[in-house]
Amino acid sequence: MRIVIIGPGALGCLFAARLGLGGHHVRLLDHTPQRAALLAEQGVFFEEDGMRHHLAVPVTADPATLADTELLLLCVKAYAVRDALARVQAHWPPDALLLAFQNGIAHLDPLGSLPPSCRWGLGITTEGANLRAPGQVRHGGHGVTRLGFVEAPGDEARQQLVAAAAAFQGAGLAAEVVGDIRQSLWQKLLVNVGINALTALYDCPNGALLTIPAARERLIAAVEEAALIARAQDIAIPADPVAITLAVCRDTAANLSSMLQDVRQKRRTEITAINGAVVAIGERLGIPTPVNRELTDAIQALEQGVA
Ligand code: KPL
C-alpha cells in the first residue's frame, strides 16, 4: 500500500517504521523543511522489544508529492490539524482515505469541514511511542488500533478501511475496524481527561495519581463530569469510566503522560482538545464542568509560564 504519514512525531515515526518494515511504500510529510531534510538524510531509528532497526524513509515538506497515495495517516498534534489539512487539501489524491490519530475531540471540527471529496475516518490507538530525538522512536508498549468512520461510509470507503486495518495487522500492529468510532474516541478521551492534566500539574507519573488523595479525588470528579457530557450526547461509554481510568493509572504506572512530557519540554499541550473540549460542550449543553474548567485554566497558566 502507498502510505503517507503526516507528522513525524512519536506516533508518526512508529507507524512509518512498522508499516515500512511490513513491506509498504511509506513516506513522511513534515511541515518543517529543515527537519524533513534531516530525517530524509538520517532515516528513522526504531527500537522495539530490545531490537534496533534503521529504515531509510523518504521525507518531504512538499504536499504536492502526495499524488499517488492510497492512505494518509494524520499524526500531528490536535492543535495542528487545521493547518495540516489546509496544506494537504489542495493535493488530496483522488479516492485516498485519510485516518486521523489525535487525542481528544477537537479535531472533529476541522475534519468535519472538509469537502465531501476528501474521504476521512478516525484512528484510536493505545500503542505506546516515545520519541527520543527527531526520527528516533521507541515502541513503548504494544496496544490496539481501532479504525472507523463518524458517518456511515459508502462501500468503497468501507473496503479502504478494511484494507488499512489489514495493512496494520500485516505490519505487526493489532488493528480492528469498529462500527461506532465515537465510542472508542470518548473512551480514550475519558481516560485522558482523568490522567493527562493532573499528571502535568502534580508533575508525576500516571501511577502516582492513585496515591495522592487530592489528585485521585480530582481525577474521579473530572471523569464523572466528562461521562455526564458523553451520556447527554447519547454516546455509549463504559458503565464505570472512573474504574477504567484508575486501571489505566495502574497499568501505565511508570509512564509519563503525553501532557506531562509536553509541559516538561515547554511545548504547547493538548489541553483544549481534552479537558477544554469537555468544558466547551458542557457550556453548549448547559451542564457545569467546574473541575475540567479548573484543570484547563491551570494547564493554560502553566503553558504561559505564570503558574
Ligand atoms: O494516552 C495517554 C497519554 O499519556 O496521552 C495515557 C493513556 C494517559 C498514557 O499515558
Image (cartoon, rainbow, N blue to C red):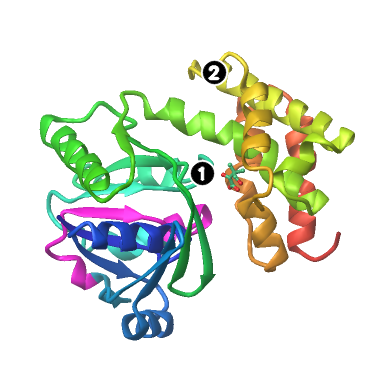
Q: Locate the N terminus by quadrant.
A: bottom left
Which image quadrant for residue 63? bottom left
Describe the element under mark 2 as helix, strand or loop: loop
Residue 168 or residue 75, whichever sits in front: 168
Residue 179 visible to an observer of this rendering: yes
Q: Locate the C terminus by quadrant.
A: bottom right
Q: Position of residue 44 (x, y in %)?
A: 37, 73
Residue reaching furthest to the front: 50
Which image quadrant for residue 109? top left
Which residue is depicted at the point 33% across and 40% down?
174
Residue 6 or residue 304, whichever sits in front: 6
Amino acid type of the residue tagged 1 in the rendering: Ala
Describe the element under mark 1 as helix, strand or loop: loop
Residue denoted by label 2:
238
Q: Where is residue 122 in the image (x, y as percent from the top left)?
A: 36, 40
Image quadrant, ligand 1: top right
Q: Which mark is residue 106?
A: 1
